[in-house]
Image (cartoon, grey):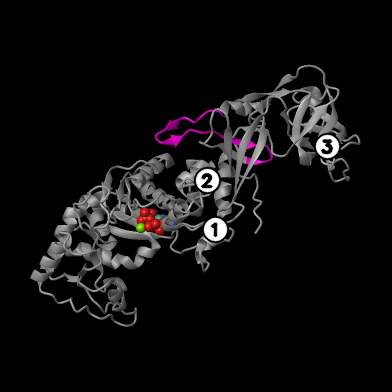
Amino acid sequence: METEEKSLNFIEQIVEKDLQEGKNDGRIQTRFPPEPNGYLHIGHVKAICMDFGIADRYNGVCNLRFDDTNPAKEDTEYVDSIQQDIQWLGFQWGNVYYASDYFEKLYDLAIRFIKEGKAYVDEQTAEQIAEQKGTPTEPGVASPFRDRPVEENLRLFQAMQNGEIEDGKMVLRAKIDMANPNMHFRDPIMYRIITSHPHHRTGRRWNVYPMYDFAHGQSDYFEGVTHSICTLEFVVHRPLYDYFIDQFAEGEYRPHQYEFNRLNITYTVMSKRKMLQLVKEGLVAGWDDPRMPTVCGLRRRGYTPEAIRAFINTIGYTKVEGMIDYTWLENAIREDQKEKAPRVCAIFDPVKLVLTNYEGEGENLVAENIDGHPELGTRDMLFAKELYIERGDFLEEADKNFFRLSPGGREVRLKNAYIIQATGCDKDAEGNVTTVYATYDPDSKSGTEGGNRKTKATINWVECNTCIDVEARLYDRLFACENPSAEEGDFRELLNPDSLKVVTIKAEAALAKEMHRPQVINGIAQVNHYQFLKQGYFVVDPDTTDNKLIVNRTASLKDNWQK
Ligand code: ATP
Ligand code: MG
């Protein structure tokens, strides 16, 4: 999927044109600018694949820049996880930068703006300022503080920084144009006061913090970014991005902003704020809950970097917003695992099968990890007199459309083993089958000449005494409705109540080798992926211990979601 040559996306076309025209002396520099206020989600991966992808493809560099301008929400826990996730996805940045590296420079720039009459301190409340903004067709109203003398603005801005003014009591605004049809030009806020929280890197050094619009373009400029790529909601910010840079930039060089469509996926939310709420309120088990659309959640669910990147490659980049069906994501992991995941047998709803004519201790059969691919290895499966099969694979009274086990002479193959015929069963007082009886044909072993005999059905089995109990966590979509963000009311009430079922299953002995706490490398548990025959793709969960193997269902084999 990934090596497939695709036509250039529209940003790659822009980059190629810039290179042809010799812009920036052929230098390509991008950045990925997460705010460290949460874990990365699959939407961020779309941006990561773009930002790092452009740099890789055109011999450029992509830097990681933490957009850490709001100490009230940011934390080093997020800084660490973001770095881990990017590397796990298979990307490597040139440098790590922080917007907070530029606080000094940005503050000096703000002072310069004040001195040049381009900024003023406003003492109105946030509500008053919002009321005066006007509408796209009606001009806004000037603040009564708009024409303050420069000296007073300087004194008040310094007082804001000195901690002499309470949070929310004053802001620094750019003095641009209260009638501009672009609302972002109507004296946007440049600085606000935040004294309630220390900054994760600068501690208590600052009491004023720059707003996104005053920090982002400048940071791009300071670093030498050539292509500053973000999502479509920033189109309307672009003129302001250019305006601020034009006020102080020297020479020819300018960073340029380009925008593509955000990723939205059905049956989930793509907002860190909402995800944080789910985590904090215990509605999911954490940021890495396998139902979460976070990178760590997808990883724990069993998604591989290759599958995630293939998914992003499939959906592509456009300039129109849209919604991607969740099944695309599942199809990407199915496609990825199809020829990678070793197959094993696991019985989800077991009933005992006794082979009445089987004598002896049992024998080791050899099964290929992936049928038809002996080069991918084999495993031993102990075959003996007492097995477990799926309850649904036996019917005491079956019609002619049922091809699996039922008394009356029909032949069924036990996967990788022998052909059997059911002879009868035991039942409990309620009529539930407790034991199925069958005879096996010793001349029908798979892999021998007799093994070529065809049956209409093949069923799975595990050996009773050597199989292990495994906790299987069966995950489904986190939300019950397609677009929870578009619904009115509380999004938490739209959660899918059946998004997690925990069952104990019986797995073949080969899985016993997974019963140990997984090794952790660079903070990431090293776990293996499997296909449980007829059941789906599974991955070992890091909660596994020496006594208990826990697996997560990554995806069923086919899409069986019912609306
Ligand atoms: P959220 O709304 O979830 O908090 P954000 O946009 O505030 O997301 P940032 O940390 O600021 O999160 O995002 C870093 C980069 O990732 C930005 O360039 C942003 O445009 C991009 N990004 C965030 N969400 C998506 C998405 N759903 N699809 C594509 N790119 C995204
Ligand atoms: Mg943001």
What's the distance in space between the residues labelled 2 and 1, CA to CA?
Answer: 16 Å
Furthest residue to the left? 151
Q: Is 525 a magenta residue?
A: yes
Q: Give the residue pinned by disc 2.
A: 290
Say which quarter of the image contains residue 229. bottom left
What range of the chain is rendered magenta? 515-536
**Residue holding disc 1:** 266
Label annotation for residue 137? none
Where does the image place residue 519, in percent across and percent down from the top left?
Answer: 46, 30
Q: Nearer the viewer, residue 521 or 10?
A: 521
Image quadrant of ligand 1? bottom left
- The answer as to whether callout 3 falls within 8 Å of ligand 1 is no
Q: Please name the residue shown 38% across and 64% down the image.
A: 233
Badge 3, how many Cα within 10 Å: few under 14, some, many 20+? many
Work out whether 364 lies above or below 8: above
Secondary element at tag 3: loop
Q: Which residue is mark 3?
A: 405
Q: State yes or no: discs 3 and 1 in contact (Cβ < 8 Å).
A: no
Residue flagged by tag 2: what amino acid is it? Pro
* Image location of residue 242, percent across then percent down: 25, 64
Task: Give whichever of 176, 406 is nearer the camera.
Answer: 406
Q: Secondary structure at mark 2?
A: loop
The number of numbered discs placed on residues in the rendered structure image is: 3
Q: Earlier in the sequence, mark 2 or mark 1?
A: 1
Give the class, few, some or many, for how many residues have Cα within 10 Å of label 2's Cα (few <14, many ≥20): many
* Label 3 vs label 2, nearer the camera: 2
Q: Earlier in the sequence, mark 3 or mark 1?
A: 1
The relative height of residue 342 versus residue 303 in the rendered view (above or below) is above
Q: Nearer the viewer, residue 18 or 560?
A: 560
- In the shown orientation, is residue 395 left or right of residue 159? right
What amino acid is labelled 1 in the image? Thr
